Image (cartoon, coloured by chain):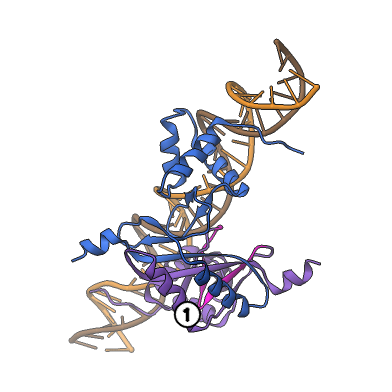
Chain colours: A blue, B purple, C brown, D orange
DNA sequence: CCAATAACAATAATTATTATCAATATTACC
DNA sequence: GGTAATATTGATAATAATTATTGTTATTGG
């Protein structure tokens, strides 16, 4: 079997994602980690992001338009994407609402539902205030 | 203003998507339409798929892994992606369940929620039966 | 400390999609 | 119906995002 070795670059990426509330893309992570390890390469960032997603330490947020984003918050929560400024924000929902929704899906489907991901779209607070 | 002219290629793409229950990618649409218009180009397929999405005649299904898929069913419904065979299937949910879920999201968010998209993951009927 | 090898940096390759442009098809008008 | 105007096409080049390759470096078990 193949063992996982420690890597300061990977650790740094994980740390960054666990402390920021942004939902950076691979490129944004790259820009940030470069300040600490100036000769890290973008490929290493991608490799480690995929590794960490695989491992369950971070979450990949992909909502269709352009690049994937990454999130260090692995607790169950939902994402909102602003159609004006493209910012991604978290939405936490009461457990009951989520359970009911999943239950309803399960009732209407023949196979086995194991997980789900929901993206909400609209205008964030700032943008909806500035729109008039 | 710019008027929209008829195009047999576009019509053919729309027809195909409205009659299939698959959720083909641009490439799969291309392969199908080529049987009817052998010298259609992939660019034309992309161009028309985007046009039809814009127009609201079809829906784009993008759940992160690889290519976008397209769906001729524009009635409100949800999508399930099998983690084993990658098939995409439809799930329709009772209106109340959806409304309650959206309402709950709205209550927990400061901005304005206008739309949402949910993907369910797991094993489809066939795969969950074959797994043991 | 050192050999084995996981992880690295640099970069090439791939995949999915969009843009460009001359040729063709569709439509409005006579 | 014929023709001018132009939307759409097919072919292909370009771009964006991500993954694979390769020789070098860092980590770790013995």
Q: Quadrant of residue A10?
A: top right
Tell me if residue B67 can be seen.
yes
Residue A5 in magenta?
no
Horizontal and vertical percent position of residue A122: 34, 66
Q: Quadrant of residue B2?
A: bottom left
Seen from the viewer's position, the closer of residues A125 and A51 is: A125
Q: Quadrant of residue B116?
A: bottom left
Question: Could you tell me which quadrant the N terminus of chain A lies in?
Answer: top right
Seen from the viewer's position, the closer of residues B15 and C25 is: B15
* Depicted B44 relative to depicted C25: above or below: above
Horizontal and vertical percent position of residue D17: 47, 49
Tell me if residue B39 can be seen.
no
Instruction: Give the residue number, with chain letter if any, for mark 1.
Output: B76
- State left or right for residue A53 relative to residue B96: right
Number of marks = 1
Horizontal and vertical percent position of residue B39: 52, 68
- State left or right for residue B12 relative to residue B127: left
**Which residue lies at the image location 38% right of the left edge and 69% below the top edge?**
B107
Output the chain of dot 1: B
**Which residue lies at the image location 68% right of the left edge and 74% below the top edge?**
A111
CA neighbours of label 1 inside 10 A, class few (<14), some (14 to 19), many (20+) = few
- State left or right for residue A93 relative to residue A123: right
**Which residue lies at the image location 26% right of the left edge and 60% below the top edge?**
A127
Seen from the viewer's position, the closer of residues B71 and A5 is: A5
**Which residue lies at the image location 40% right of the left edge and 77% below the top edge?**
B56
Seen from the viewer's position, the closer of residues B56 and A47 is: A47
- In the image, which residues are magenta? B65-83
* Depicted C29 relative to depicted B62: above or below: below
Residue B77 in magenta?
yes
């Amino acid at each position: 079997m193949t063992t996982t070795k420690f890597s300061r670059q990977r650790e740094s990426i994980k740390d960054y994602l666990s402390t920021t509330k942004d939902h950076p893309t691979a490129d944004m992570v790259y820009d940030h980690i470069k300040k600490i390890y100036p000769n890290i390469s973008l490929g290493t960032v991608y490799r480690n992001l995929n590794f960490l997603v695989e491992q369950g330490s971070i979450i990949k947020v992909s909502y269709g338009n352009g690049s994937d984003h990454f999130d260090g918050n692995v607790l169950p929560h939902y994402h909102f994407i602003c159609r004006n400024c493209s910012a991604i924000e978290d939405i936490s929902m009461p457990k009951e609402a989520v359970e009911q929704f999943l239950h309803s899906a399960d009732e209407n489907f023949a196979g086995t539902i194991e997980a789900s991901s929901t993206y909400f779209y609209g205008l964030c607070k700032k943008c909806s205030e500035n729109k008039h």
